[in-house]
Amino acid sequence: MADAIEIRGVTKTFPGVAALTDVSFSVRSGEVHAVVGENGAGKSTLMKILGGVFTADRGEIRIDGKPASIRSVQDAVAHGISVIYQEFNLMPELTVAENIFVANLPTRRPFPLLRLRSLREQTEALAARLDLDLAPSEPVKNLSVSRRQMVEIAKALHQDASIIIMDEPTAALTSSEVDKLYQIIRTLKAHGKTILYISHRLKEIFDIADRVTVLRDGRCIGTEDVATLSHDDVVRMMVGRDVKHFYHHAGSTLGEVAIAVSDLTKKGSFEGVSFSVRKGEILGIAGLMGSGREDLVKALYGLAPYDSGEIRVAGRAVRIASPKDAIRRGIAFVTEDRKDAGIFPLMSVKENVSLNVIRALTRLGGAYIDVRKERALLREYTGFLNLRYASETQAAMYLSGGNQQKLVLSRALAAECGILLLLEPTRGIDVGAKAEIYQLLGELSRKGIALILVSSDLPELIAVSHRVLVVWQGTITGELEGADIDENTIMQCATGSRRVASGGR
């Protein structure tokens, strides 16, 4: 099989950082080739070089055996390369159709008038071909994170490129959407397309890839046939060590009820929801996208105000209408969208950590910030979460995904919360960072913090949770404990085909 891409000695440096050093490997025509590595290993930098966003300092790229000069996105497109980036590149005010066909909108000649009917029909035809549930006229700003990801996929695939790069394409997708993407990839492969597939979910590598290349610290560790490797083999290549005790179940002693919810209702999202969480308990929440699980957790933080029902914190009835109310009650929140709603990308690492408690760090009635206290706070959470950054003044946007997630966690914990809400806390981070997050959740549980965890990663949810609630169409269909917490039971409850009460009754 001929090589679709040859990467020879590619090197890329940024100020003070060697992102890629002498990277060389090849990708065969018509194969699904995975590229894996920890956050900061250089995967995204390499993909952006192939996509024309960055230019390599040294090295050569050959496409179909010929040297390729890729110095812009247009050059990449001209060489038949299309990229689906992990971070969305959509225009929220435009419709689904306009975003997908933005580079070649159908117009009437000789006047540049948009042919709306043609645009709608082309979008519907593409969605049908890819089996995607997308409404052409829907503004992208109204879509969930997972549906925005499907728009990105459609946008890239409509160009009919010969080489398709997918950077974390399933990070925001449900299990059924992942299966749909797998089918799209198999169809593309059957038509001779070459797929470069980047993912932190190692199961996907074994599900879909033919070969895998591992990067570590900007260097190529090796390329192997997936069939010859085990999960542990790939992890060792990625991190240079064994990641023991990958999941860290809390094993803590549970205390009194920290938060209780009774008959909570938000019209159109969830209805009559009741549950409680004790100090030191990790309560997992499962459910398909659109089930209401995200709005339920956001309601506890005042981001999706509820219509009726009661919330009690430490036994006292409270009304939470805004994040300010939640913070005042000792409730912290970690968003699933760290880029747009989590970190403050242009602010420093130090500022990102201290932002929620800035008043406590001021002196003379708020006249100025006590920098020594602020630095001490940063040092505390740097040690606790193993944060990695170049300096305290480094902008958050330049951190790896795993360290950005730890930064969001640091800011939440700095407020000394007693209740921590987490939406997809390990989405888009590598296996090493995931292990650290799991260990952290266990430590927080042992400290007596009540945690509510929403995750689409069922093995993760099963392994770290004391109990799991399953939400279907805005109602709780499962409350699972102990041996009842398994993928089959969760999926039956998540699809409405079964109801399970506490203890499996």
Image (cartoon, rainbow, N blue to C red):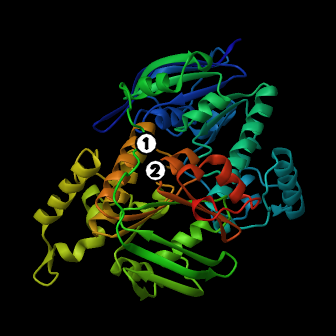
Q: Residue 185 lies in what quarter of the image?
A: top right
Residue 35 in percent (x, y) is at 54, 29
Furthest residue in direction top, as rendered: 1
Nearest to the observer: residue 208 or residue 48: 208
In the rendered structure, the answer to whether residue 203 lies left or right of residue 451 reads: right
Residue type, label 2: Val
Asked whether the residues under the numbered discs 2 and 1 touch, taking CB atoms below 8 Å apart as contact, a structural biologist would say yes
Residue 131 in percent (x, y) is at 82, 48
Q: Secondary structure at mark 1?
A: loop
Where 285 falls versus 474 (above or below)? Answer: above
Where 451 falls versus 11 (above or below)? Answer: below
Nearest to the observer: residue 489 or residue 118: 489
Which residue is depicted at the point 13% across and 65% down?
A: 373
In the rendered structure, the answer to whether residue 245 lies left or right of residue 308 reads: left
Q: Which residue is identified by label 1?
A: 247
Q: Residue 393 lies in what quarter of the image?
A: bottom left
Q: Earlier in the sequence, mark 2 or mark 1?
A: 1
Where 353 falls versus 474 (above or below)? Answer: above
Q: Which residue is identified by label 2?
A: 464
Residue type, label 1: Tyr
In the rendered structure, the answer to whether residue 125 lies left or right of residue 29 reads: right
Nearest to the observer: residue 32 or residue 52: 32
